[in-house]
Image: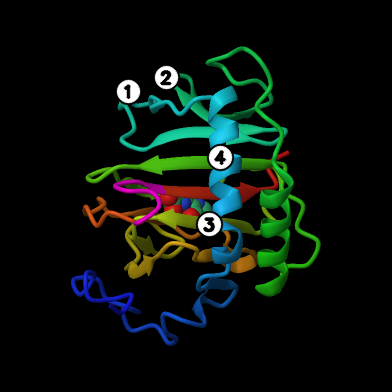
Amino acid sequence: MSTRGLFDDMPIDGGIDGGIDGSQEIGPRARVLRAFARPVAGELLKAIAAVERISPFRHLVTPGGYTMSVAMTNCGALGWTSDRRGYRYSSIDPETGTPWPAMPDVMRRLAHDAAAAAGFERFEPDACLVNRYVPGAKLSLHQDKDEQDLDAPIVSVSLGMPAVFLFGGLRRDDPTAKVPLFHGDVAVWGAEDRLRYHGVMALKDHPHPDLGSHRINLTFRKAG
Ligand code: MD6
Ligand code: FE
C-alpha cells in the first residue's frame, strides 16, 4: 500500500510546492525534509525510552490553568516546562528535582545534520522537548519565543502516527497552511520564519507499525 491511502483526508501539500518524498519549502527559511530521520528512527526510539526512564512524560499545566493534552519530557542541558507561573526553560526537571537526562548523541547529530541540510550550519541544540500525542491530543496555535537565541533555527522530528501541522504567519490571525507530517519527517525553520505561529491539529487514530496509537515529536532548540 502507498504511504497515502489511509490519509486521503489529509492534504499532501495544501497548495505548497513539493511532494511527500523530497524536501518541501513551507516558507523562505522553513522546510520539511521528508523521511530524513527514518534511518535512525529505531535508535531514536531507544534513546527516548532511556530519557523517559529518568524524566517521565507528564501533562503540564499552562499559566491559564489548562492541562495540556500532549505529554512532555525533555533531554539536554535545558528543558521547557510550564506551570501556573508561566513558561520557562530550566536545567532541573521540576518533577524529579534533578537535571534533565543528557541529550543522546543520535539526537544531537540528527538535529545538527537536518539543520545543515536546510541551510543552517553549526546548529548546536542545548534543549530537546519530547512531545507525546495520543488520538485527540492537539497543540494550539503558538509561537516559540521562550528561547534566548532567536537566531538559531528549530528542528522538529516526527515519529509514529501522522499529524497535520498548522503553519501560520507572524500574527495569530494570519491564515495557516496544513502540512501533514509523517514518521521520520523533519521540519526545520529559522531566520524570518522563526516566530511564525504554528500548531498541531487533533490527532486521528491511524496506528503506526512501531508506535501504535502514539505520535512523538522531538523539538530541538538553542534555548540558553
Ligand atoms: C509538534 N511542534 O510537532 C509540535 N515548534 O508536535 C512544535 O510546536 C514546533 O514542530 C516549533 C518548531 C517546530 C515545531
Ligand atoms: Fe512550537
- Residue at 69%, 51% (x, y): give it: 106
The image quadrant of residue 137 is: top left
**Marks 3 and 4 close (CB-CB < 8 Å):** no
Q: Which mark's residue is nearer the viewer, 3 or 4?
A: 4
Left or right for 33, reference 12: right
- Gap between marks 1 and 4 measured at Cα: 28 Å
Q: Is the shortest distance between ligand 2 and the CB of mark 2 under 8 Å?
A: no
Helix, strand or loop at mark 4:
helix
Identity, as a three-letter code, of the amino acid under mark 2: Arg
Q: Badge 4 local density, few (<14 within 10 Å), some, or many (20+)?
A: many
Which residue in the structure is indicated by mark 2? 84
- Residue at 32%, 27% (x, y): give it: 67
Q: Position of residue 33 (x, y in %)?
A: 55, 72
Point out the stretch of residues depicted in magenta: 209-215
Q: Examine the rendering and report whether any part of residue 144 can be seen.
A: no
Could you tell which of marks 1 and 3 lies nearer the N-terminus? 1
Image quadrant containing the N terminus: bottom left
Which residue in the structure is indicated by mark 3? 157
Could you tell which of marks 1 and 4 lies nearer the N-terminus? 4
Identity, as a three-letter code, of the amino acid under mark 1: Gly
- Gap between marks 3 and 4 measured at Cα: 12 Å
Identity, as a three-letter code, of the amino acid under mark 4: Ile
Q: Is the shortest distance between ligand 1 and the CB of mark 3 under 8 Å?
A: no
Helix, strand or loop at mark 1:
loop
Kindly give the residue lying farthest to the bottom in the view shown: 17
